[in-house]
Image (cartoon, rainbow, N blue to C red):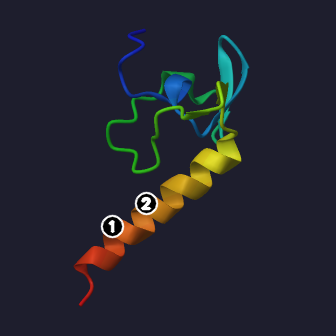
Amino acid sequence: MNKNMKNCSNCGIAIKHDEDSLDCFKFGKKNASIVDTEKCDYYTKVIYEDGEAMTPLQHLLLKEQELKSRKMKGVI
């Protein structure tokens, strides 16, 4: 699988159990590693802070704020 492709296996919101098993922290999908997330609004690249990856919860909170701010830009 291409590491540069957007998919659950390289999403910051994924909870990784091992090489072939992960869960989506947002949607609770089990074994989501094979899912192509081109259409997933919640896909986010892993963000590192002080050399460590942020937790799936931290990634989710940042993504929800980003999505909320996008929606507010359209509201007048």
| Residue ID at (50%, 54%) | 63
The type of residue carrying mark 2 is Glu
* Res. 59 visible in picture: yes
| Residue ID at (54%, 23%) | 9
* Res. 28 visible in picture: no
- The residue that mark 2 highlights is 66
Q: State whether residue 20 is above or below residue 63.
A: above
Point out the residue furthest to the bottom here. 76
The type of residue carrying mark 1 is Arg
Q: Secondary structure at mark 1?
A: helix
Residues marked 2 and 1 touching at CB (< 8 Å): yes
Q: State whether residue 49 is above or below residue 28.
A: above
| Residue ID at (57%, 35%) | 12
Q: State whether residue 50 is above or below residue 20.
A: below
Q: Whole-Å distance between the Cαs marked 2 and 1?
A: 6 Å
- Position in image of residue 47 (x %, y %): 54, 35
Q: Nearer the viewer, residue 37 or 44?
A: 44
Q: Which of the 4 image quarters holds residue 18?
A: top right
Q: Which mark is residue 37?
A: none
Point out the residue furthest to the front here. 50
Q: Which mark is residue 70?
A: 1
- Position in image of residue 35 (x %, y %): 46, 29
Quick one: quadrant of the C terminus? bottom left
Q: Check disc 1: other Cα within 10 Å, few if <14, some if 14-19, many if 20+.
A: few
Q: State whether residue 69 is above or below residue 30.
A: below
Q: Check disc 2: other Cα within 10 Å, few if <14, some if 14-19, many if 20+.
A: few
12 horizontally vs 38: left or right: right
64 horizontally vs 15: left or right: left
